[in-house]
Image (cartoon, grey):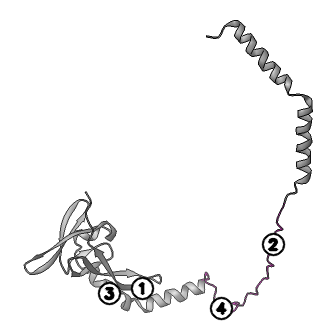
């Protein structure tokens, strides 16, 4: 425990240390700071010249504007002229009864296994923690996906989707066997 006299001695010692820092040390420090400030020059890199903008003339004056009524009329005429070719793919799909696995998107369907039943390959798929058996000819996903092939490692599908122009087209999709983690 520090006594009263020891505290007093410690305070006197601290004051003497502070007093020892003479004004000459402070003056030297300030002189050095001034010298350093005067010797240091900032190095700022020059900014590159901005690129010159050259306007281009509009050369599509005689062409139909993309948002005009004339363009809309052209598109509607084209759609009226070609509905039979495009709808030939989708018409049978709209006429048949939907299967339960068509309610789920394809990315929510997980293939977890396969087996052979009555000599035919059968895939096991999981949707919302329910297990389903899928055979060739069954439908999966929301894009009219018809199963064309079942193998030990995957399911191949033929889907019918619309392209950017609104035309129906076929595409293939695959569903790969997923390893189940516990």
- Which is closer to the viewer, label 2 or label 3? 2
Give how far apart the Cα atoms at labels 2 and 1 are.
50 Å
Q: Is residue 62 left or right of residue 90?
A: right
Kindly identify the residue that appears in the image at 88 percent across and 49 percent down: 36
Residue 37 in picture, x, y percent from top left: 89, 49
- Mark drawn on residue 63: 4
Question: Based on the displayed image, in which of its 4 quarters is residue 68 positioned?
Answer: bottom right
**Image quadrant occupied by the N terminus:** top right
Instruction: Please report whichever mark, 1 or 4, sits nearer to the chain's N-terminal start.
Output: 4
**What kind of element bears circle 3?**
helix
Instruction: Please report whichever mark, 2 or 1, sits nearer to the chain's N-terminal start.
Output: 2
Question: Based on the displayed image, in which of its 4 quarters is residue 72 positioned?
Answer: bottom right
Is most of the magenta stretch helix, strand or loop? loop
Give how far apart the Cα atoms at labels 3 and 4 are.
34 Å
Residue 45 in picture, x, y percent from top left: 82, 66
- Which is closer to the viewer, label 2 or label 1? 2
Asked if residue 103 is positioned above or below residue 170 in the image, the reply reads above
Is residue 108 in the magenta section? no
Question: Few, some or many C-alpha atoms within 10 Å of disc 3 (few <14, some 14-19, many ≥20)?
Answer: some
Residue 133 in picture, x, y percent from top left: 17, 70
- Mark drawn on residue 48: 2
**What kind of element bears circle 2?**
loop
Instruction: Please report whichever mark, 2 or 4, sits nearer to the chain's N-terminal start.
Output: 2
Q: Is residue 152 left or right of residue 40?
A: left
- Mark drawn on residue 167: 1
What span is colored magenta in the figure?
43-68
Question: Few, some or many C-alpha atoms within 10 Å of disc 1 (few <14, some 14-19, many ≥20)?
Answer: some
Give how far apart the Cα atoms at labels 1 and 4 are.
25 Å
Give how far apart the Cα atoms at labels 2 and 3 are.
59 Å
Instruction: Please report whichever mark, 1 or 3, sits nearer to the chain's N-terminal start.
Output: 3
Q: Nearer the viewer, residue 27 or 133?
A: 27
């Amino acid at each position: 425990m520090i006594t009263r006299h020891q505290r007093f001695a410690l305070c006197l010692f601290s004051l003497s240390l502070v007093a020892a820092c003479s004004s000459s040390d402070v003056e030297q420090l300030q002189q050095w700071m001034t010298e350093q400030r005067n010797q240091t020059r900032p190095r700022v890199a020059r900014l590159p010249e901005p690129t010159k903008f050259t306007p281009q003339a509009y050369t599509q004056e005689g062409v139909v504007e993309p948002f005009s009524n004339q363009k809309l009329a052209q598109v509607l005429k084209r759609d009226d002229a070609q509905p039979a070719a495009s709808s030939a793919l989708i018409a049978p799909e709209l006429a048949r009864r939907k299967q339960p696995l068509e309610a789920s998107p394809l990315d929510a369907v997980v293939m977890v296994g396969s087996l052979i039943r009555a000599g035919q390959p059968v895939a096991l798929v999981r949707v919302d923690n329910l297990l389903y058996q899928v055979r060739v000819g069954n439908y999966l996903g929301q894009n009219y996906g018809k199963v064309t092939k079942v193998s030990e490692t995957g399911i191949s599908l033929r889907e019918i989707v619309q392209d950017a122009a609104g035309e129906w087209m076929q595409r293939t999709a695959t569903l790969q066997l997923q390893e189940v983690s516990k």
